[in-house]
Image: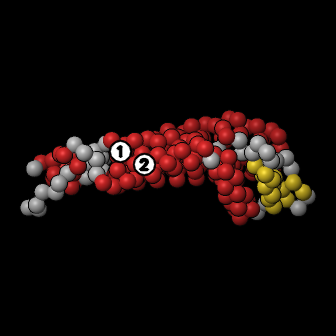
Amino acid sequence: MRPARSRVSRTGRTSLLGRVLGPLLLVLCGFLVVGEREYRFHEMAAAEWLISQVLGLRTMVLAAPEAPVLYAGGDDGFGRGIALTTGCSSALFIATLALLSGVLLLFSTRRPTRILLGFVLAAVLIGGTNLGRLMLIVAMQHRYGDEGFGWTHILFGSVLMMAAALVALLLFLYMITRTSTDDAEDDAL
């Protein structure tokens, strides 16, 4: 029999780790909202690198005033570019997860490591899916022109991001609500 650990939920207070990480995630949320344009430029740079490495296309990103524009093409030159606007970025999805995680860390009695792990996994899923969506849009545009762009951006890309957001939220909820054997043992005491 193990000695009983002090549980956060028994005292009704959040842990020290939660009181430290909570404000940090709230600040991250603020940075993602206020610095959303800067985030989009970094997101587009990551997409440019992936497209050149995975698809083997020549790429170029231009810093247009409203949004970064990615051009990709083969030896015959660049085709039409795609702009990464606010609605096409993963910044606000991740900002929402950071806000929820920060509030939970500050006011919940859940384990901070679970909340943080849930946030990280969900954020990686959202960010990775959006990079994959951008690669798919460029590949289809390169192969099928404007029609390929339209189908993958408007229809398939939107459905993909909605599905990824739902899966990320469910993963986040699973991570913060699941119980381990340690939790069950502590509750039995």
- Which residue is drawn at the image coordinates 40% and 41% (left, top)? 103
Q: Which is nearer the eye, 186 or 55?
A: 186
Where residue 8 sits: x, y (%)? 23, 49
Where residue 131 sits: x, y (%)? 64, 52
Where residue 111 sits: x, y (%)? 30, 51
Secondary structure of the residue carrying tag 2 is helix
Residue 106 tag number: 1
Give amino acid for label 1: Leu
Query: Dividing the picture into quarters, in which one does residue 4 lie?
Result: bottom left
Secondary structure of the residue carrying tag 1 is helix
State how far apart marks 2 and 1 are (Cα): 8 Å
In this picture, is 152 found above or below 41?
Answer: above
Is 15 left or right of 185, judged from the image as shown? Answer: right
Q: Are marks 2 and 1 in contact (CB under 8 Å)?
A: yes
In this picture, is 54 found above or below 32?
Answer: below
Of the numbered discs 2 and 1, the one sitting upstream in the chain is 2
Give amino acid for label 2: Pro
Where residue 153 sits: x, y (%)? 71, 40
Q: Which residue is mark 2?
A: 23
Q: 10 Å neighbourhood of mark 1: few (<14), some, or many (≥20)?
A: many
- Which residue is drawn at the image coordinates 40% and 48% (left, top)? 22
- Which residue is drawn at the image coordinates 68% and 46% (left, top)? 37
Q: Which is nearer the eye, 91 or 143?
A: 91
Is 143 left or right of 99, judged from the image as shown? Answer: right
Residue 33 tag number: none
